[in-house]
Amino acid sequence: MGGSSPFAPPRIIPQRCSGCGRCVAACPLKLISLESSGYRKQAVISDIHRCSSCGLCMEACPVGAFFSSGEKE
């Protein structure tokens, strides 16, 4: 872990996030939390620089709210 992946860390599409929390449970580094956004909860990555880019959050998300921008620059 710790940034060993050749891929960029994932990003979140806020409009797609349903607030289910599956990504929170999937993140091995515990970097994702649910925060209130108006009347609903939404996933937030707390420290994107610590993300290992493992992709588990993207796999766990049932609505496709996570995406990767490809390879690291």
Image (cartoon, helix red, strand yellow):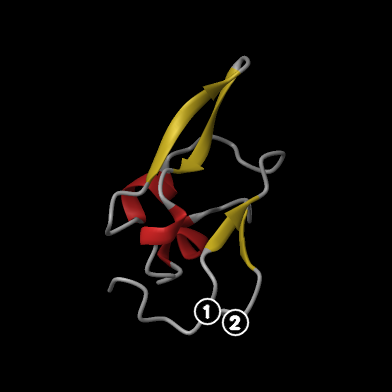
Which part of the image, by quadrant, shows the C terminus?
Answer: bottom right
Instruction: Give the residue at x 56% y 53%.
Output: 62
Q: Using the image, tell me which numbered label, if any, was put on residue 7.
A: 1
Amino acid tagged 2 = Glu
Kindly indicate the quadrant of the structure image that contains residue 24. Answer: top left
Q: Position of residue 25 (x, y in %)?
A: 32, 48
Instruction: Give the residue at x 63% y 16%.
Output: 38
Q: For this rendering, which residue is in front, 8 or 28?
A: 8
Please tell me whether residue 20 is drawn above or below residue 38 in the rendered image.
below
Q: Earlier along the polypeptide chain: callout 2 or callout 1?
A: 1
Are dots 2 and 1 in contact, CB under 8 Å?
yes
Amino acid tagged 1 = Phe
Q: Which residue is mark 2?
A: 71
Instruction: Give the residue at x 36% y 60%.
Output: 50
Side of 28 where 12 appears, left or right: right
Please tell me whether residue 51 is drawn above or below residue 16 in the rendered image.
below
Mark 1 closeness class: few <14, some 14–19, many ≥20 residues within 10 Å: some
Mark 2 closeness class: few <14, some 14–19, many ≥20 residues within 10 Å: few
Kindly indicate the quadrant of the structure image that contains residue 46. Answer: top left
